[in-house]
Image (cartoon, rainbow, N blue to C red):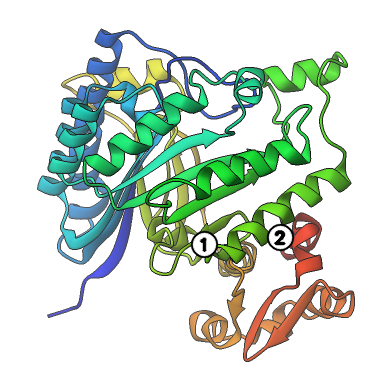
Amino acid sequence: MQEASELEIYVHIPFCVKKCAYCDFLSFPGTERTKEEYVAALLNEIKYRKNTEVTAKGLDGLFAVTSVFFGGGTPTVLRPGLLCEILRTLREEFILSEDAEITFECNPATASFEDLMRLRCAGFNRISIGLQSAVDEELKRIGRIHDHAIFLETYENAVKAGFENINVDIITALPEQKKEDVKKTLDSVLSLSPVPGHISAYSLILEPGTEFEKMDEAGLLFLPDEDSEREFHWMVIDTLERAGYRQYELSNLALPGYECRHNIGYWTGKQYLGFGLGASSYFGKARYAVTRSMKEYMDFFGSKKRTGEIPLSECEKLTDSDEMSEFMILGLRMTEGIEVREFFNRFSRNVFDVYKEPLHKHITEGLLECENGRVRFTKRGQDVANYCLADFV
């Protein structure tokens, strides 16, 4: 019997209490009725696409789902019963590995202890909590709906509910942020009991169309300069590594054994199916995304009769050149970098032949290094990662 290949699943919940000033994700508030109707359509989508994309191609039983990730938006603005129903439907339609990593994102103030208990009992085994900052003034500045005390309560409730695999999100380079603000956030995270197994640490990026971009254009946003942004970033990395964490990706650190398997799947080219409004998939040598229009989505998946093509916002068949480029761009985000032998095994090409010029250029500049059969960023290279990665497009 053929051994099942690994597959990941992403589920997008587009609802949130209110949009944060820096957020460009596909998210918006919604009424309880809208949320219930969306989940009903989402369940239809899962069943329909399972039949059209997996069963119809004769691939049933050839994939074992090793990770499921509920993102958004804020998944926990849904009643826990709705999240449980989605997970139950995934279990009915797909083969989930016994040790599958099943994550949901949670903003403080959106889930009670009882909610978290119910989700843990339903099979969710990893929670990602958005702290962003332990400084209340910063939380207000960026438009978060919680304060530090509410985060601490949510974290304690997650531990009491039985979650042993917890991620905490933090953001640096926030408006008017100072070094002591970053230190306060790090001290707070490291004083948690138990400490989180995983920490995602991002630097703020001004995204088009956000409230922060408009404020910046009006001269009302006072961001740290580039040198301070890098200082804050390395302060986070160095502090957490001294506490036993390992930076395994440009913006992610974990205690041993707590690396996010779902995200590692993205960075190493594992196939995944994305369900929900705007969700992206990488399956069958193609990348495609469900429509971002709520009306289109509900008209197709919310109705009993589905005729015509699934509404997509994008669809691209990948060439070998595309896949080699993605292998480099995604793989180099991992601090271990890419393995030269794996590149050859996948593409029957030598990476130093395919990318001779950019590899020579950035190794000479001291931004990349090749050691023990792997190509990876140097510490200096991480500071200009986007400059390097652009040469592999």
Q: Amino acid at mark 1?
A: Trp
Pointer 2 local density, CA inside 10 Å: few below 14, some 14–19, many at least 20: few
Question: In the rendered image, which quarter contains the C terminus?
Answer: bottom right
116 or 337: nearer the viewer: 116
Residue 124 at x, y percent in the picture: 23, 45
**Residue in view at x 18 percent, y 39 percent:** 47
**Residue in view at x 64 percent, y 22 percent:** 142
Left-right relation of 317 to 281: right
Report the disc number at residue 267. Answer: 1
Left-right relation of 205 to 104: right
The answer to whether residue 12 is seen in the rendering is no
Residue 168 at x, y percent in the picture: 47, 44
Q: Quadrant of residue 252?
A: bottom right
98 or 118: nearer the viewer: 118
Q: Amino acid at mark 2?
A: Val
204 or 149: nearer the viewer: 149
Residue carrying label 2: 393
Residue 169 at x, y percent in the picture: 52, 42
Q: CA distance from mark 1 to mark 2?
A: 15 Å
- State the SS at label 1: helix
Q: From what the image shows, is residue 198 above or below residue 89?
A: below
